[in-house]
Image: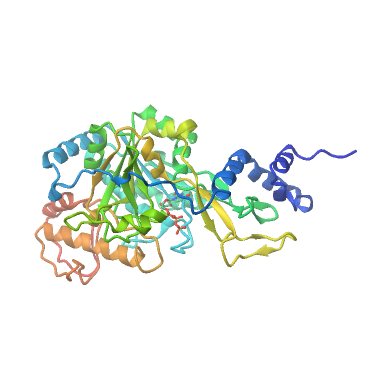
């Protein structure tokens, strides 16, 4: 009598994805169980739909950018913004922090392939003197906010399957950098299978599907599924401050930004910086069909023509660059996470995906052999009511560690941290020598517990009973 296959295997067969179980019969029972468990994570209808829409579709066909215009933004006071409105925003934001309405949210589920660092990216030592890891920098900023406003915000850290355990262990080992462990939550994002160029789900081992994180847009789903939104609701927090794990300069809990967001009744707010030049590889805040959108640098029409357009005064027309810092309304996230008409779209990324050949032998591809599907958080913007974009000072908010060297590397980020410390010292009346770019000739480090901006730094500096001599290796806490 024939044994009927496992229902999951039968479903994969029906969807033309039977190759996932090609080596199943020769696996040990625990390996079979592992593969079945991974297979159960996959939404076969979703993969079929993505194969139809993203794989089979004409790859050169792009959405029309007809009617595209730069999105309006609130300029900083020094660039013509309304000084009184910024001050009002700040007061409102400080009130929200005092009332415990804001949670911090770090997305740390990326794979960090460009940096090539072995370990969760948040554990990368980033500061110039103490070599503090990225996670510690954020922890101290959160603690500093707590000290300043009397309530320490809850912190959600999004991990992925591969780095979740190591991330938790790192926090435990460092005693949560003095935060209350009960107020730090690790939430693990979902993953998606890679498919071959023919739409077939790829195996990375006889007992393992090639699965990878579902993009930073997966954060909206996981905030809902993990119960994070419910927890926030119980605690009276309604605003999520979203930032990336790779940017130690970020003002994690910025009162002015929070104030603009709340006063406008915005469901999703963003920060922009003026692009350094037409070819800086960041997304662009634009309006399209009456909605605020981010159009990526890599979008062909953008790359070909729009990025070079200039205003009559010579400034770049599409100068508002996105630096992946957002505020999200809790219930907006819930609405987006539950999908329906609001589901975030998936994007296709062609990658070299290590896999197996038909005989089960490992293949290390030399060129792109597969496709990964990812969601991007900024795709939520057009669904948000009253979205606000504000300008921020790049030097005080953005210097990511993306690459091992060159632009956006540990070296450029270190220099930007040094320049910031030097600027704050200057502003507090301490003359130190710098080069033309503001870089001091030696290492300095300011803990966020000493100051998180020019003002809080100056206040702490004034309070020092005796002023330290500024020298190589000076660390202020
Ligand atoms: P990046 O786009 O820089 O990707 O992520 P990455 O995976 O970190 O690095 P590469 O491209 O492999 O070199 C931007 C931010 O989004 C997070 C990252 O951790 C980073 O903070 N991210 C990205 C996630 O949390 N999950 C993802 O699936 C992707």
Q: What residue is shown at x 60% (from left), y 43% (from top)?
A: 47
Quarter holding the N terminus?
top right
From the top left corner, tell me how far across and down residue 191 is, in percent: 54, 46
From the top left corner, tell me how far across and down residue 411 is, in percent: 33, 67
From the top left corner, tell me how far across and down residue 444 is, in percent: 23, 64
Task: Find the residue positioned furthest to the front.
Answer: 66
Q: How many marks?
A: 0
Residue 104, above or below 133: above
Task: Find the residue positioned furthest to the left.
Answer: 429
Colour pattern of the rendering:
rainbow
Q: Is residue 129 visible?
A: no
Quarter holding the C terminus?
bottom left
Among the 4 quarters of the image, the one containing residue 4? top right
Q: Is residue 325 visible?
A: yes
Q: Nearer the viewer, residue 405 or 278?
A: 278
Among the 4 quarters of the image, the one containing residue 130? bottom left
From the top left corner, tell me how far across and down residue 462 is, in percent: 11, 53
Horizontal side, residue 428 vs residue 228: left or right: left
Residue 7, above or below 65: above
């Amino acid at each position: 009598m024939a044994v009927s296959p496992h229902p999951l295997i039968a479903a994969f067969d029906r969807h033309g994805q039977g190759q996932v179980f090609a080596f199943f019969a020769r696996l040990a029972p625990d390996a079979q169980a592992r593969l079945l468990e991974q297979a159960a994570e996959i939404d076969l209808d979703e993969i079929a739909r993505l194969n139809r829409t993203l794989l089979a579709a004409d790859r050169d066909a792009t959405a029309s950018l007809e009617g595209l215009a730069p999105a309006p933004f609130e300029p900083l006071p020094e660039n013509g913004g309304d000084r009184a409105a910024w001050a009002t925003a700040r007061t409102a934001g400080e009130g929200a922090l005092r009332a415990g309405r804001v949670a911090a949210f770090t997305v740390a589920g990326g794979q960090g392939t460009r940096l090539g660092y072995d370990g969760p990216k948040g554990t990368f030592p980033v500061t110039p003197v103490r070599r503090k890891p990225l996670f510690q920098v954020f922890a101290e900023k959160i603690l500093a906010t707590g000290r300043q406003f009397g309530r320490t915000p809850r912190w959600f850290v999004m991990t992925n399957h591969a780095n979740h355990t190591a991330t938790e262990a790192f926090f435990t080992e460092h005693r949560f950098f003095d935060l209350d462990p009960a107020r730090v939550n690790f939430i693990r994002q979902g993953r998606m299978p890679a498919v071959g160029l023919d739409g077939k789900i790829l195996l990375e081992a006889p007992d393992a599907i090639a699965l990878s994180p579902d993009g930073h847009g997966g954060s909206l789903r996981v905030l809902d599924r993990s119960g994070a939104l419910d927890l926030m609701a119980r605690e009276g927090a309604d605003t999520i401050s979203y930032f990336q794990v790779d940017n130690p300069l970020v003002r994690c809990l910025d009162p002015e930004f929070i104030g603009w967001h709340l006063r406008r009744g915005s469901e999703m707010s963003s920060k922009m910086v003026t692009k350094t030049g037409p070819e800086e590889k960041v997304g662009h805040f634009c309006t399209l069909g009456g909605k605020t959108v981010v159009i990526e640098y890599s979008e062909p029409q953008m790359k070909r023509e729009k990025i070079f357009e200039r205003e009559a005064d010579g400034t770049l027309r599409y100068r508002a660059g996105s630096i992946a810092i957002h505020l999200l309304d809790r219930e907006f996230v819930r609405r987006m996470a539950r999908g329906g008409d609001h589901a975030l779209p998936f994007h296709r990324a062609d990658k070299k995906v290590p896999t197996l050949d038909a005989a089960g032998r490992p293949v290390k591809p030399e060129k792109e052999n597969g496709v990964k599907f990812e969601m991007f958080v900024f795709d939520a913007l057009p669904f948000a009511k009253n979205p606000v974009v504000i300008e921020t000072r790049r030097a005080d908010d953005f210097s990511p560690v993306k690459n091992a060297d060159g632009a956006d590397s540990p070296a450029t980020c270190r220099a930007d941290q040094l320049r910031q410390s030097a600027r704050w010292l200057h502003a507090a009346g301490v003359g130190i020598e710098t080069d033309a770019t503001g870089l001091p000739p030696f290492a300095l480090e300011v803990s966020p517990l000493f100051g998180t901006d020019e003002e809080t730094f100056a206040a702490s500096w004034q309070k020092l009973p005796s002023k330290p001599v500024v020298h190589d290796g000076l660390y202020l806490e």
